[in-house]
Structures are given as structure tokens and as C-alpha cells.
Image (cartoon, grey):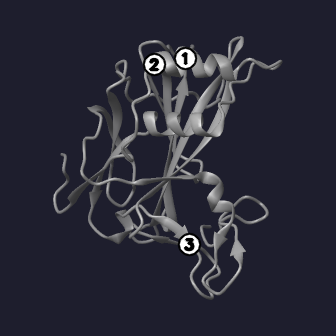
Amino acid sequence: DWPPPGANLLRLAPPPGEALSRRRAALILERAAANPLGIPVPDEPELQEFFAAYAPSFEMAVRADYDRVGAPRWLRGATAPEVDGAQQVVYAHPAWTRYRDRVLLQLVYTLWFPERPPQSDGDILAGRLDGITWRVTLAPDGAPLLYDTIHPCGCYHLFFPTPRAQALPAPGGLEEWMFSPQSLPSIAESERPLLRIASGTHYLEKVLAVRGGDSLARYELRPYGDLRSLMRMDGGRASMFGADGLVSGSE
């Protein structure tokens, strides 16, 4: 059932921005890939256009503060970062993948929750800090080819193909293969994905398509690199991540 009993719904849309047509997106990608390696590397203003244009909206079932997306921060004397639910923030960074003979641009969006509360006694999945990462793989013509999502712990990897992508047959043996719970229609220029997120577990329940500015509540887009140098309230700066790439206290 949606919404689930006892939960309030919070819908967050990305910041308003200028529309990015698929034609302009294709021209940027073509120009950005005019290098010996054929890797599309848009300049910073162009990259911000892409992040704003392809950012998803979120519809979250909220029962308590553990369901409120926020900005990681270092409190005074803390040995692990906390998530400030008063700042509704999504962090974005680019990535790339090789698809057949082309290198494709990917747009990666990550949001953080303060914790995953225990669902029962001895729940080994519960603990401090939780999140969702949503990734958009763009075709050279600027249209989304494939979406996928994963939790920052490295679990629950799900694929959401558009009509332009088909899954290859799974290989033999015990290798874990692609799990695609839902296919998506072609997302029009005036639409964006809406991600429904469960309370507590923060599982992705469903992906829908909505039009433009579908919510009065907005989140802020920030560079993912900001997490590598957060201000400490007791002075100085510190990364959210340890030398091993893991977040202290999230074990």
C-alpha cells in the first residue's frame, strides 16, 4: 500500500533550472568527447546543466527523523559524521562507462539518511547512516539509456532499463546477475523519474515518471566532492571517509 499506514509523505524535487533540450545535450556530449580517448567530459557549467536536468524527484514515507534526508556534518567532539535533516541535500558527481565502442557519461546522485533503524531484535542490517545512490547512463543523443540504483553499503543493486536497453542472458554458474524489478518508459524532456522510498529500510519501492517541478519542496544539489572536506565545528576540516574509503561509525 502507498502511502503506508502511519507515515507522512514528503516529496522533494530538484532545484528549478533552465530546461536542457535533448538536442543541446547531444551537442554538448559530442563536443565534450572530441578528445583522443573519446571520453565525454563537459566543462563545469555544462555539467551543472546536466545534473539539474536529469535529477530525480523523491517521494519518501516519513515516520521519524531516520527518514529525513540530510547533509552529513561533523559535530563538536564527534568521532563519526551525523546527518543534519534540516538541510535537504543530494550530492552529485559524474562517472563514465564503456558501452560497446563508446564511452558514455553517467550522472550519479546520492542522498543520506541518519540511520537505518532496527526492524526487529538483532537486526544486523540496522545501524548509523544509510543512503541511496541513483545513476543515469546517457546515450550519445542525450536520452537516458539505463538507470540503476544501489545503497552506499554496496547492497540492493537494481537496474531500470528504458526501451532502448535489453538485458543480456545471464552467464552460467553461480555468478550473481542483473536484477531488474521494473522497466521504465522513455522519459520525455519535460519529465523526470520519481523514486518512492520506504520508511526505515529506505528500500526503493517504485519508480514513476513525473513532469518538471512537481513539488513545492526542493532539495539542494551539491558536489559529492564536498564530502571529502567537511567543516568541523571544533575547528578545521575532515573527510566524511576514512583512508580505506569507509565512513567511521557506519560498521
Q: Is residue 7 above or below residue 138?
A: below
- Residue highlighted by disc 2: 22
| Outermost residue toward the right in this view | 36
At mark 2, the secondary structure is helix
Q: In the image, what residue type sits under mark 2?
A: Arg
Cα separation between marks 3 and 2: 37 Å
Q: Residues within 10 Å of mark 3 (few under 14, many from 20)?
A: many
Question: Upstream in the sequence, badge 3 or badge 2?
Answer: 2
Residue 11 in the image, given as x and y percentages of width and height: 27, 51
* Residue name at image x 62 percent, y 73 percent: 249
Q: Which mark is residue 128?
A: none
At mark 1, the secondary structure is helix
Q: In the image, what residue type sits under mark 1?
A: Ala
Q: In the picture, which quadrant includes the C terminus? A: bottom right
Q: Nearer the viewer, mark 3 or mark 2?
A: 2
Q: Residues within 10 Å of mark 2 (few under 14, many from 20)?
A: some
Asked if residue 46 can be seen in this view, the reply is yes
Q: Residues within 10 Å of mark 1 (few under 14, many from 20)?
A: some
Q: Which mark is residue 73?
A: 3
Q: Quadrant of residue 230?
A: bottom right
Residue 190 in the image, given as x and y percentages of width and height: 32, 26
Asked if marks 1 and 2 touch (Cβ < 8 Å), the reply is yes
* Residue name at image x 79 percent, y 64 percent: 243
Q: Quadrant of residue 22?
A: top left
Asked if residue 124 can be seen in this view, the reply is no
Cα separation between marks 1 and 3: 37 Å
* Residue name at image x 55 percent, y 27 percent: 137
Residue 89 in the image, given as x and y percentages of width and height: 45, 58
- Residue highlighted by disc 1: 26
Number of marks in picture: 3
**In-front residue for pair 103/205:** 103
